[in-house]
Amino acid sequence: MTRINLMPGAPSAEPVARVRPKLILRPRKPLNKRELASVFDRVRKRVLKGGEPFGIFVIKHGEGRVFRLLSIRDPNFEAQFRVNKALQHMIGIYDGGAELGDVYDDLYQFDRLSAA
């Protein structure tokens, strides 16, 4: 005797094949005005204060992004620097002698297609 499930939506006895998504380059997403203003204010304070070089990294956080400024002496700096370059997560490395206009241009150009 074979059991027949007549209820729609009920789980079936058939195994479900799980498909693993392919690792692909995410679509480009430039910084919006709010992100640009927020990150630039933090970078400006750090550059004007002087001191040791630091890197700016973009890290996926849930549905959004987080921008981290890490000193080159921070142990997390090396880990973030080794993350897959295809994700284009590092914006740049700067120190106290950086020109703020150049930093702003780097932030503005992050993840934009080059006009070639």
Image (spheres, rainbow, N blue to C red):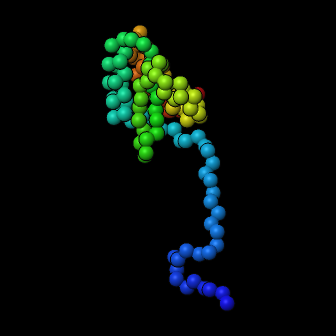
Identify the residue shown where x is 40% and y is 22%.
Answer: 104
Residue lying farthest top?
A: 97
Q: Going by the image, does 20 lie left or right of 73?
A: right
Question: Looking at the rendering, in which quadrant would you find the C terminus?
Answer: top right
**Is 70 drawn above or below residue 18 in the view shown?**
above
Say above or below: 5 vs 20. Answer: below
Count of numbered labels shown in the rendering: 0
Where residue 88 appears, x then y in whole percent? Answer: 54, 32
Quarter of the N terminus within the rendering: bottom right
Of 81 and 116, nearer the camera is 81
- Where residue 6 appears, as percent x and y from the top left, is 55, 85
Name the residue located 52 percent from the left edge and 77 percent from the top edge: 10
Residue 114 in sight from this viewpoint: no
Q: Nearer the viewer, residue 34 or 46?
A: 46
Q: Residue at x 52, y 80 (%)?
A: 8
In this view, the residue in front, 35 or 69, is 69
For image coordinates 43% across by 46% down, the residue present is 63
Where in the figure is residue 90, as x and y percent of width and height?
Answer: 50, 28
Residue at the right extreme, as displayed: 1
Q: Where does residue 113 sit, x and y in percent of width and height?
A: 53, 32
Task: Tell me if I can see residue 26 in this picture.
Answer: yes
Residue nearest the observer in this picture, 27 or 48? 48
From the viewer's perspective, tell me whether residue 50 is left or right of residue 8: left
Residue 79 vertical placement versus 63 (above, below): above
